[in-house]
């Protein structure tokens, strides 16, 4: 049966409520103390687990203890320091370039606008949304691999394009829930709706999931 936009919004609200009950403590799992540390941790997290990033940043943020340390560092040495996160040369260039731009063009302050954030080297909408939501408490959704998979299973979107998914979801979910929604869906994707082996029988949102019977 075809679902209209109003019915879809109602279902999105029920999914949100069920997720709040199932994952009341869901939050960003990256370790950081300052806005720039979150920005750097998020750049490192591309194609890498948060667990691995946290292992690396524990010593990284001691060795490079200010934003200027990253801005004026030797990128080759930085690449070695972040080697285990993968794509280390590219990530080192992004981290140094973004830090330099923030220091020299933004008075050392991590920007609080999407347009300015995505101008930074290595920063796309995913990283920018993470910073906007976590640091500035602005409504934003991070479309990571779990969000892509689960929102498709829930039929709240029908594309793998992260930007299109973000805009589809903005139409369906209440703005006040956007930041928390990302964290809850990530927890759900790690614990229950696991890629290729979703645990539908123990899923808190199975009543609202059109994919429950097919167990994709
Ligand atoms: S019912 Fe199954 S497919 Fe749907 S969200 Fe839950 S675990 Fe994922």
Image (tube, rainbow, N blue to C red):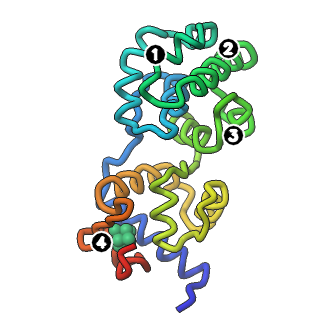
* First in residue order: circle 4 vs circle 2: 2
Mark 1 neighbour density, 10 Å: few (under 14) some (14–19) many (20 or more): some
- Is 100 drawn above or below residue 186 in the view shown? above
- Is 93 drawn above or below residue 125 in the view shown? above
Q: Mark 1 sits on what residue?
A: 81
Quarter of the figure with residue 39: top right
The numbered mark at residue 114 is 3
Q: Where is residue 124 shown, x and y percent of the image?
A: 65, 40
- Whether the residue carrying mark 4 lies under 8 Å from ligand 1 is answered with yes
How far separated are the C-alphas under marks 3 and 2?
18 Å
Q: Where is residue 34 shown, x and y percent of the image?
A: 49, 22
How far separated are the C-alphas under marks 1 and 3?
29 Å
How far separated are the C-alphas under marks 1 and 2?
21 Å
Which label lies toward us, 1 or 2?
1
* First in residue order: circle 3 vs circle 4: 3
Which label lies toward us, 1 or 3?
1
């Amino acid at each position: 049966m075809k679902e209209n936009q109003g019915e879809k919004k109602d279902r999105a609200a029920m999914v949100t409520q069920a997720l709040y009950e199932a994952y009341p403590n869901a939050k960003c799992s990256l370790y950081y103390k300052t806005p720039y540390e979150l920005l750097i941790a998020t750049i490192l997290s591309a194609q890498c687990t948060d667990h691995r990033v946290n292992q690396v940043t524990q010593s990284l943020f001691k060795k490079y203890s200010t934003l200027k340390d990253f801005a004026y560092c030797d990128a080759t040495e930085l690449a070695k320091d972040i080697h285990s996160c993968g794509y280390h040369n590219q990530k080192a260039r992004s981290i140094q370039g973004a830090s330099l731009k923030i220091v020299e063009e933004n008075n050392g302050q991590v920007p609080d606008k999407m347009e300015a954030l995505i101008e930074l080297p290595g920063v796309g909408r995913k990283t920018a949304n993470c910073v906007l939501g976590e640091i500035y408490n602005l409504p934003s959704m991070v479309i990571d691999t779990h969000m892509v998979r689960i929102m498709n299973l829930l039929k709240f979107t029908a594309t793998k394009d992260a930007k299109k998914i973000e805009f589809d979801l903005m139409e369906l979910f209440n703005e006040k829930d956007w930041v928390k929604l990302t964290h809850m869906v990530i927890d759900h994707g790690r614990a229950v709706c696991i890629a290729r082996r979703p645990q539908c029988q123990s899923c808190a949102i199975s009543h609202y999931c059109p994919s429950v019977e097919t167990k994709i």
